[in-house]
Amino acid sequence: MSRQTTSVGSSCLDLWREKNDRLVRQAKVAQNSGLTLRRQQLAQDALEGLRGLLHSLQGLPAAVPVLPLELTVICNFIILRASLAQGFTEDQAQDIQRGLERVLETQEQRGPRLEQGLRELWDSALRASCLLPELLSALHLLAGLQAALWLSADRLGDLALLLETLNDSQSGASEDLLLLLKTWSPPAEELDAPLTLQDAQGLKDVLLTAFAYRRGLQELITGNPEKALSSLHEVASGLCPRPVLVQVYTALGSCHRKMGNPQRALLYLVAALKEGSAWGPPLLEASRLYQQLGDTTAELESLELLVEALNVPYSSKAPPFLIEVELLLPPPDLASPLHCGTQSQAKHVLASRCLQTGRAEDAAEHYLDLLALLLDSSEPRFSPPPSPPGPCMPEVFLEAAVALIQAGRAQDALTLCEELLSRTSSLLPKMSWLWENARKGTKELPYCPLWVSATHLLQGQAWVQLGAQKVAISEFSRCLELLFRTTPEEKEQGAASNGEQGCKSDVALQQLRAAALISRGLEWVASGQDTKALQDFLLGVQMCPGNRDTYFHLLQTLKRLDRRDEATALWWRLEAQTKGPQEDATWSLPLYLESYLSWIRPSDRDAFLEEFRTSLPKSCDL
């Protein structure tokens, strides 16, 4: 009777194994199918078949003869499910835990042990495998999946302890995960073992590549390009899929750029472009390299190609039904040099670089294209570009208006400003409240007072370009009225300026007031009203003592009014400021304000000051 029972058990085991092998072959056939729908259906059917087989196996008491097959089915089920979902879930962790518990059941280790965590279960299961060598191969494959799950979840401490247990080394023997992975030596599968979708050695290679890549990229992000190089070279020399190799070459290019090796950086970026169709990251990195080299033409060409590349839908081959390197990589990090953003973000980088490099006509066209893209409902909501801090929509409008004015298209700039005012006019009654939020550093439209005031400032400059002096003065006055109306008292500034955002607002506010006062003063000068100009320049010096352009314009006006004693005293103050420590702004200004300030910065300042110095009496000379 016992022989008959054994025969029946062996027959069932053969049937279960045959079903596992058939489902694995089906998944591999699906993988090679060129038809997407058929591929997906075959794979889903195989997954459901493995689920049913596992349910049948685990519906019976755990038995040593069946366990190698049961663990293999668990592994195949996890591999196929994770590859179809392109990620791991908590369910897969539970599948692994259930497999370990089944191993311990055969050793009559029930009760408290089963309530321990996964790490403790692994210790117990691997110790049990010493008594059951037939489980070793399947357990190592299951351990590889556990390692993949923990790596994707960034549980590196647990991963290290698991590898130490697999390597039969003492805890803490090696802190280098890469070395632990290299040391791990999974046993070879028996020739008559059940079929697997992926063996433990293949999984080990994937883990090595993924971990080296993750570590190299993290070192690069945190500013250690030298350390990143060794890890990234490890990836490039291993079994690396082409999409990942593109990213690796790009990261290597970034390392060499930061280390001052532009030629080697360029070689890696060219290699990245040759490896695949994901051209975004290498093109963005190339633009950074050319900017660093001062080759503006090549930089802008790279950015134009980047915009075009991001407009083409990226098509990649369907991933195989395996645990692949991409599955174990972290989600895109905004701080990563490999993050190239969306087409609108790339377009903004291109437009802003054209503006910064004096290519106003190109900048104007790119900004208009960008606004059309952003206002199109098909484009996702605009977010900051890869290099934070990025502008929001109102600042893109303001930058576009600056580009149009600089390109001599004042009327178009006015139209754009009117559009921006129509979008922000509803906020005007709330300006005081918004300003308080700006100073406290809250996220509630912190720069709205600056946007509205800056819009009137740019309108004034556009009217200057059109020769409408009175309208220009009116716009400059409107800008100043809004700034003074929404600004807290000067005595409150020290106590109120808490947080980084408040500081940025303060710096931008001071420079915006100086720009408006200088602009209106220059129009008074142009109309021959030096006395009114003098009042604006004096107020500018008082309100923004860090802006030296206001001192210069005030000095010129005092000289024209023949108020020599006051002019001489002011000249001495300028001299003292020049020799003393420079008061550079702690925070960078918005691009639209930087560009505007460059317009009203006198080009003959040094020559005028030298001429004024030589005109002083000898006793006053240095």
Image (tube, rainbow, N blue to C red):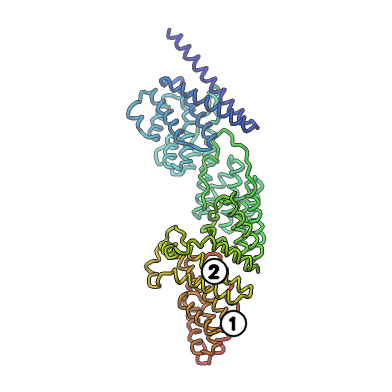
Q: Residues within 10 Å of mark 2 (few under 14, many from 20)?
A: many
Give residue 614's quadrant in the image. bottom right
Q: Is residue 491 above or below residue 46?
A: below
Q: Kindly identify the residue that appears in the image at 51 percent across and 44 percent down.
A: 330
Q: Is residue 398 above or below residue 572?
A: above
Q: Amino acid at mark 2?
A: His
Residue at the far left: name it: 112
Q: Which is more toward the observer, 426 or 66? A: 426
Which quadrant would the N terminus be assigned to in this image? top left
Q: Which is more toward the observer, 141 or 226? A: 141
Residue at the far top: name it: 1
Q: Is residue 497 above or below residue 195?
A: below
Say which residue label 2 marks. 456
Instruction: Report if residue 295 is visible in the image.
Output: no
Q: Kindly identify the residue that appears in the image at 44 percent across and 58 percent down.
A: 444
Q: Which is more toward the observer, 374 or 107? A: 374
Q: Kindly identify the residue that appears in the image at 54 percent across and 80 percent down.
A: 553
Query: Which element carries disc 1, helix, strand or loop?
Result: loop
Disc number for residue 274: none
Spot occupied by residue 599 in the image (x, y as percentages of width and height): 59, 72
Q: Which is more toward the observer, 246 or 238? A: 246
Q: Kindly identify the residue that appears in the image at 46 percent across and 29 percent down.
A: 139
Q: Gap between marks 1 and 2, in whole Å?
A: 21 Å
Spot occupied by residue 158 in the image (x, y as percentages of width and height): 42, 39
Instruction: Report if residue 131 is visible in the image.
Output: yes
Spot occupied by residue 21 in the image (x, y as percentages of width and height): 55, 23
Q: Is residue 110 left or right of residue 162?
A: left
Spot occupied by residue 300 in the image (x, y as percentages of width and height): 65, 59
Q: Is residue 275 left or right of residue 473?
A: right
Say which residue label 1 marks. 527
Q: Is residue 269 above or below residue 423?
A: above
